[in-house]
Amino acid sequence: MNMFLSRFDSQSKLLLRSLMSGASGVHRAVDVFHRQQRSNPEMSVCHFIETLCEDEVTCSQTGEQPLSVKPLVSLFPASLKQNLLSFVYLIHSVLPQTSVLRLLKCLSQDPHPNAWISALCRQIRRSVGVHDEEPLYTPLCSQRLKELSQRLAVCAGTGGWAKCLSDQTVESGSQSASSLSELGTPRKRKVSLVTVDSGDEETGQQSKRIKMDVCGSEQKAEEQDIHEETSEMLEREEPQPAPDCPCESLPEHIKVAVLQIKELLESHSEWDQSSMDVFKVLNDCDPAQVEVLCSTLSLPDVPEPTLPKLCSSVLTLSPDLSYSTAAALIKSLLLEKVLSLSEPASRCLVTAVTSLCVRYPRPMCHALIGPILKEKNIGNPQAELLNRLIEGCLDSHYRLLLLQMTFQVAWSEAVLSVIHSLLESRPDLNEEVFTQFTEQLLSQGPQFTKSVKFAKMMLTVLTKYSSHVTAAHKHSLSCYLTSNETFLKKSLQAALKRITHTT
């Protein structure tokens, strides 16, 4: 799935990750959708659906079959498709009919359709106003319904339920007896001793015994069918762990603390010192337990007004959290919130991010800032928040670390803003790092010949880092500046020309 995630923008990626959350995926996706709409009323999932419907070239795992072209959504596991369709069904009223029908058409191209997925597709078609004569149930389900209705029709005459259930019991009793005789343990069922007489009272009592016995046998048969169907589904599809299972692996005292923290996060009252002490459990957790704890608490869904109180509680802990614990907490609590920004961050979110960055700068760089820089479609809200951290929270060696991180990502206008802020903060660049940075300028610069942000960043390099520019650097930069098309071109060339103390 990771190879497909890169096809989506940041907001769509959040929706897709939510839908991948197993049984709770639909609920989480709807929550993410509503949060995104609150932050940006113009937000739409049409682009998300368009990406799902894009063609993808695929080949068989063995390589024996020729290459084929399929919609991207058809390559997802059945569990994710079911969550996706359930999500679309819940929000179809705000979606264009053409987008919904295109998605359904892509999903109908599966050569081995899943019964649930087919039923959901037909239900959504009806909901958007498209006439569909096909029933929601499968042929097998239809056959079972017909058999049941015929059985009830036959029993509607003399004898009623007693006769119907008696017939069924005798049949099941004979089958059980034959199977038991094969096992070498002949034993008669209690119900085989029951006969239906004409007396009303005796018939009623015997009918009750018969019904109880038949219900028990049918319940066992249904449980067996469910067990077999579940086993087949697990063999065909990727296993989806039950959402509560991971929490069961936690020690008892951590389970108790999780419940207390959850209650605390859901309360609207002020937190006292005893309430904050419950977060001490974080120092008792290993990295795997921290992941489970964060998932159980649904930290990505914590309301922003609660963030300052939560972060204050974490900052009061002594000793400080380990690197792995702090990184897991920061990623779970803040990453989705920052990536989904479509407008400047709220005061509560800024307070939470800056307070954790001051205390835990290294985990912040690796768990939050690094992943944000790797996103292809980050915008000004994310860049503004990162620039706040660079200017007010990070020491020189962490700013240098972030600058080196930018060498490993594709540059965009937002990333250029972050790089410019890093250069203005004057990190301690050595010759090796400056050479790597110059190589990035030359390799990624051609796409920014008309970018004023890139030109300003270049001007900062030539004025504040002139002592790092060698003769080789100067020659390469001079060739590049001839292609610049901004109003700063002459200023850039003049700044480069003033650099004479090169080696």
Image: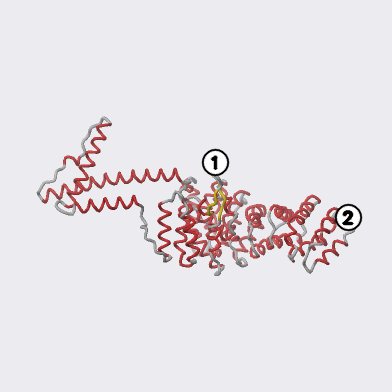
Query: Is 69 placed left or right of 193 in the picture?
Result: right
Q: How is the image coloured?
A: secondary structure
Residue farthest top in this picture: 184
Can residue 360 be spotted in the picture?
Answer: no
Q: How many marks?
A: 2
- In the rendered image, residue 282, in percent from the top left (x then y), is placed at 56, 51
Residue type at mark 2: give it.
Thr
Percent position (x, y) of residue 36? 54, 64
Please give the name of the residue rendered at 36% of the width and 55% of the height, measured from the top-left corner.
Answer: 137
Residue at position x 41%, y 66% in the image: 129
Question: Percent position (x, y) of residue 37?
Answer: 53, 67
Q: Marks 1 and 2: in contact by CB < 8 Å?
A: no
Q: Which of these two is toward me, 132 or 349?
A: 132
Picture coordinates of residue 452, whole percent (x, y): 74, 66
User: Which residue is nearer to you in this view: 237 or 319?
Assistant: 237
Q: Is residue 189 left or right of residue 502?
A: left
Disc 1 secondary structure class: loop
Residue type, mark 1 in image: Glu
User: In the drawing, what numbered circle is on residue 90?
Assistant: none
Q: Residues within 10 Å of mark 2 (few under 14, many from 20)?
A: few
Q: Label 2 belongs to which residue?
A: 502
CA separation, marks 2 and 1? 60 Å
Q: Nearer the viewer, mark 2 or mark 1?
A: 1
Instruction: State which quadrant residue 415 falls in.
Output: bottom right
Q: Secondary structure at mark 2?
A: loop
Q: Which residue is mark 1?
A: 64
- Look at the image and tell me whether residue 157 can be seen: yes
Upstream in sequence: badge 2 or badge 1: 1
* Depth order, front residue of 358/15: 15
Look at 90% across and 57% down and name the residue there.
501
Binning the other alpha carbons within 10 Å of mark 1 as few (below 14), some (14 to 19) or many (20 upward) gives few
Decide: is 229 above or below 298: above
